[in-house]
Amino acid sequence: MKAIHRGLAAAFAFGTALALGGMAQAQTTTLKWAHVYEPAEPFHTSSVWAAEEINKRTNGRYKIDVYPSSQLGKESDINQGLTLGTVDMIISGSSFAAKAYPPIGVTYYPYTFRNADHLLAYAKSDVFKELAKGYEDKTGNQILSVTYYGVRQATSNKPFKTCAEMKGLKIRVPDAPAYLAMPKACGANIAPIAFAEVYLALQNGTVDAQENPLTTIEAKKFYEVQKNIILTG
């Protein structure tokens, strides 16, 4: 089978750096940590663990409430909320951070990285540090970590093996330029539906297909409303 596209899913944790350790203070600061992933996914379970550890290591100075499943808005909303101050920490893809500072979006372009090791090496490089500094200067927000989350694969009710076979396919992709450009170049009809609404859109036939890492496909139970999985990664 020919690969339709190759994209490594990288997620950034954004927020304010916290001072850990030291003497306990009388007042507790409560922070909001938001993301769009399901409670069963590693992003959420790790977020809850981190929130608990931060509370312990600051002797209760910081209490972090984690909001999964788009409870505080879709991915574009929580990115905006980070800037507005309505949310303090988020997990988000670089494609959404790139709306504020385009150079940081290099991680979501297809064929940029050979594999996960290449991506993680980039995340530790001087190049990334320079881009992260540019993002911080532009937005006032900090990138606290970069996480590899797998290769993006497709699910569809209409099987396809080549770019040409995607012509006319109604596919949901994130509302970001590179994600929109790839299937559009293959002649597909793109639909940038909010992540929280994808299952229903697949179920009622608004779209025929979607693409995400396997972990997300399983957690969102897209297999319940899709007939095929295409390993486009």
Image (cartoon, grey):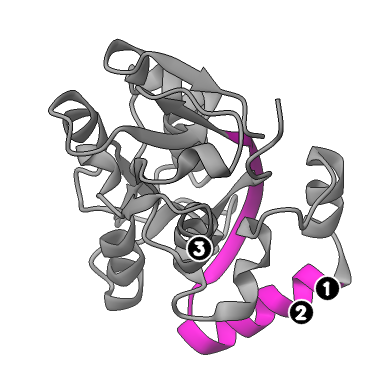
Residue at x-position 50% and y-position 47%: 58
| Secondary structure type for disc 1 | helix
Residue 152: image x %, image y %? 58, 37
Q: Which residue is mark 3?
A: 181
Residue at x-position 62% and y-position 25%: 231
Q: Which mark is residue 127?
A: 1
- Is 94 left or right of 7, judged from the image as shown? left
Q: Amino acid at mark 1?
A: Val
Q: Quadrant of the C terminus?
A: top right
The answer to which of 151 and 37 lies nearer the viewer is: 151
- Is 46 left or right of 83, judged from the image as shown? right
In the displayed image of the protein, which residue is found farthest to the left? 204
Of the two numbered discs 3 and 2 on the same chain, state the one appearing first in sequence. 2
Q: Amino acid at mark 2?
A: Glu
Question: Label 3 neighbourhood size at 10 Å, few (<14), some (14-19), many (20+)?
Answer: some
Residue at x-position 77% and y-position 58%: 112
The residue segment tinted magenta is 127-152
The answer to which of 17 and 136 lies nearer the viewer is: 136
Residue 154: image x %, image y %? 50, 31
> Gap between marks 1 and 3, in whole Å?
25 Å
Vertical placement of residue 90 versus 106, above or below? above
The answer to which of 34 and 212 lies nearer the viewer is: 212
Whether label 1 touches label 2, CB < 8 Å = yes
> Gap between marks 1 and 2, in whole Å?
5 Å
> Gap between marks 3 and 2, in whole Å?
27 Å
Q: Which residue is mark 2?
A: 130
Vertical placement of residue 140 versus 85, above or below? below
Question: Label 1 neighbourhood size at 10 Å, few (<14), some (14-19), many (20+)?
Answer: few
